[in-house]
Image (cartoon, rainbow, N blue to C red):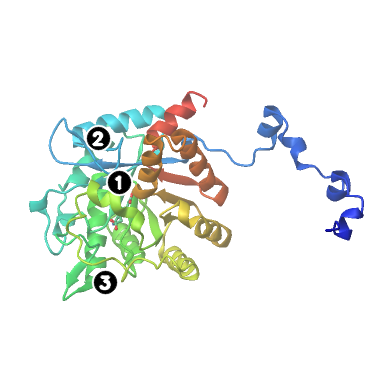
Amino acid sequence: MNKHPTFETRAPRSVDEITQGRRLRRMRKADWSRRLVQENQLTVDDLIWPIFLCEGTNLREDINAMPGVQRFSVDMAVREAERAAKLGIPAIATFANIDPDQRDDAGSGILDPDNLINRATRAIKHAVPEIGMITDVALDPFTSHGHDGILRDGIIVNDETVEQIAQGAVLQAAAGADIIAPSDMMDGRIGAIRDALDRNGFQEVAIMAYATKFASAFYGPYREAIGTSGRLKGDKKTYYIDPANADEAVREAEQDLAEGADSLMVKPGLPYLDIIRRLKDTFAVPTFAYQVSGEYTMIKAAGANGWIDEERVMMETLLAFKRAGCDGILTYFAPIVAERLKAGR
Ligand code: PBG
């Protein structure tokens, strides 16, 4: 016959003995006490809204892989910028779906002062001067092969790409961009852009470095949005960071700051919260996260299926960025969040 094991014969310790009287649930007991001890908060001031641009007028095109997100022609983008400003969103970031016949091997469209990005910047800044304009400077919307650099003999040529990106950045600043955000991960681009901006009288234009951009599968839907998915040959592993590496991310950020970056961005966001925290603790500079297209789409897809509460998950992910140390978040949810916050939810 089985006997009970001997340890069960001792009297169990009470919870007060176990916790030594420390009960963390005390401060969670009511809404007022939870509010009182809440450490982090998401406000509209934390939001940057990335929007997609397309040619034409009076156009809003749905993007299959990103339910609820549309591409706007410039006139519609102006209206959306007005809406964003009314909601109190501090800044928008533009991304362009360039017509196929405007793309070439070298991505020379970035050197056109009247390209889609620059036209949108001028129109938005003219109509809504109070909103911050962030422009992504990279070759991928303009290259026929979808890479962020000039492709020669199977290699992304660093130095020539940097020269071209720096010129593109000056044109974006001339069009009215407040912040230039280089997303290409070429070596030396931050310093080159800073020099080019300063030499052309744009000392006031800031640089937000996509300091740590990882070679991620989470960019999939974005590539549909700007029409590069079918074009991209190979992958971006020779210039984006290996998702396995964190020390390398710190080095990239250190280098970008030394070259003159005003703020850092981590991309993608949620899978890289550890990087955000490390950068914030190490450098103590304005730090941003880009909640990228794949992160957005996963939440929308699960929400559409009724598998998660979409709005609550959305708010929770954005709060997680704040907890990790972010000063702000680029998110496709920005206008929805802003409306929600305005309604006090
Ligand atoms: C490339 C660029 C990318 C994104 C913005 N600019 C990544 C890529 O296509 O490789 C991704 C944004 C997103 O996924 O939301 N310069």
Label 1 CB-ligand 1 distance < 8 A: no
Question: Which of 66 and 122 lies nearest the eye of the viewer?
Answer: 66
Question: Real-space Cα distance between discs 3 and 2?
Answer: 33 Å
Q: Position of residue 76 (x, y in %)?
A: 22, 32
Residue positioned most to the front = 1
Mark sitting earlier along the chain (1/2): 2
Mark 3 and mark 2 in contact? Answer it, CB < 8 Å. no
Count neighbours of disc 1 (C-alpha within 10 A) and say few if under 14, some if 14 to 19, many if 20 or more.
many
Which one is closest to the eye, mark 3 or mark 1?
3
Rendered position, 35 above or below 295? above
Q: Nearer the viewer, mark 1 or mark 2?
A: 2
Residue 112 percent location from the top left of the image? 14, 53
The kind of secondary structure element at disc 2 is helix
Q: CA distance from mark 3 to mark 1?
A: 24 Å
The quadrant of the rendered image in which ligand 1 is seen is bottom left
| Callout 1 secondary element | loop
Q: Residue at x 16, y 76 (%)?
A: 153
Amino acid type of the residue tagged 3 in the rendering: Asn
Q: Which mark is residue 144?
A: none
Q: Amino acid at mark 1?
A: Ala
Specify whether 58 is left or right of 317: left
Q: In this image, 50 relative to 99: left or right?
A: right
Residue under label 3:
158
Rendered-image quadrant of the N terminus: bottom right
Q: Nearer the viewer, residue 196 or 48?
A: 48
Does residue 59 appear left or right of residue 289 in this picture?
left
Kind of residue indicated by mark 2 = Ala
**The residue tagged with tag 3: helix, strand or loop?**
helix
**Front residue of this view, candidates 270 and 83:** 270
Task: Kindly identify which residue carries mark 1.
Answer: 177
Q: Report the residue marked by disc 2.
A: 77
Where is residue 64 drawn, in percent x and y?
A: 24, 41
